[in-house]
Amino acid sequence: MLAALVGCTSGERALRLGTTHTVEQSGALALLDSLAPPVTIATVIGPSGQMLHAGARGDLDVVLTHAPSLEARLLVQPGQAALRCPFVVSRFAVVGPPDDPAGVRGAPSAADALRRIARRGVFFVSRGDSSGTHTRELELWAAAGLSPRDSAWYIESGTDQAATLTLADERRAYALADLPTVARLPRLGLGPLLADDNALANPYTLYVTRGSARRADAERFVAWALESWRPRLITLTLPDGTPAFTPAAGGCSAPEHAPALEERAMLSDDLNPVARLWLERHGKYVLGEREAALLTGIDRSRSIKEAAKAAGVSYRTAWACLQAMEQTLERPVVRSRAGGLGGGQTTLTDETRALLRIFSDLSERIAQVVEREFRTAIPGVR
């Protein structure tokens, strides 16, 4: 996504600011648009990981992200950050349905909240897109001592914060979200259940990239952002009257970085890229890898019970997945026949079998493309 913010200068190409969906959907970019930056700004919006890669390549002049571990790994350590300026801090929250079936409200920490969700097997919708929100979520799962990715109740949306929250609302699921973004989506049935944990602090940082061809203008914009944009941001409030953003501590500095050869040695020879495919209907999740595994098991065994066992989920969870698919597709996914001499059987409908075949073929083709591009991007990793 590209948007232009016209400032006081003209005649040169716009200064390229790379930032995230959360910055946009929290209202921070709308506020920037209402101000008068000292230079013409072209804003590129995407997940934090994508913006940091672009910044490291020199495709962006300034980066504003909220993923400290990714920032260190992708921009600072490789020496691609010429200037680092702490900007503002918001808060993440574990959000969920009002009846809170997993008991998240009573959890003493975010990590414990995730353990409760996993223990109950209640749907959790992850962004799954290498965004700052997704990165923090994975860090919280690690702190909880869990890896939920292959669990039937764990759904990866692969999209922005607002769309992820909408999907979670439809599934009556839990999610991790930035509080200012949640506040701008008042029609959602789900709401914040746990935000009082230091692990849920959400710091935003501005970077001037080393590859910027307009270093002086980039530094001028960052100085203006700290003096003019930030004071306006910290006046925004959440529905409970608390600040949506607070100033981040610390001043601007030139980050230290690892030598290039040492950084290169950190790459492992056994790295492998992973791409996830899912299908939607009218913007609603239908089919992903877990559902495909369940359908494949049913097609082989003609038994939901056996398919659920092979997929490592309960019979109840398997039925819930099938019912969710049927509700979204508005047609049967399986056919069941009562037991007789040969026992009962469950089979896929012809449409479901065709859909599963298309999904499997497309998944394989995408994996091949991603593998090829990965080897091209990092030729030294075999």
Image (cartoon, grey):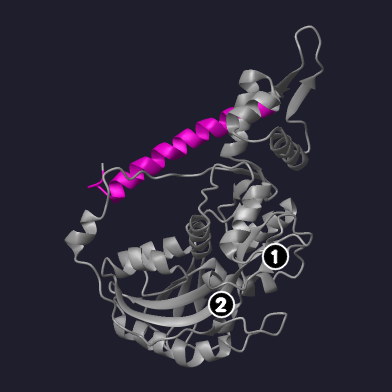
Task: Give me the residue at 53% from left, 53% from top.
Answer: 128
Residue nearer the viewer, 196 or 83: 196
Question: Does residue 350 lie above or below 269 as drawn?
Answer: above
Q: Position of residue 206 (x, y in %)?
A: 41, 78
Q: Earlier in the sequence, mark 2 or mark 1?
A: 2
> Which stretch appears magenta?
352-381
Of residue 282 and residue 292, the one placed in the foreground of this image is: 292
Quarter occupied by residue 258: bottom left
Inter-mark Cα distance, 2 to 1: 22 Å
> Was residue 373 drawn as part of the magenta stretch in this picture?
yes
Residue in the picture at 63% in, 71% down: 195
Number of numbered markers:
2
Q: Secondary structure at mark 1?
A: helix
Determine if residue 188 is in view.
yes
What residue did someone put label 2 on? Answer: 90
Q: Say above or below: 41 vs 327.
A: below
Q: Position of residue 257 (x, y in %)?
A: 25, 71
- The residue pinned by badge 1 equals 106
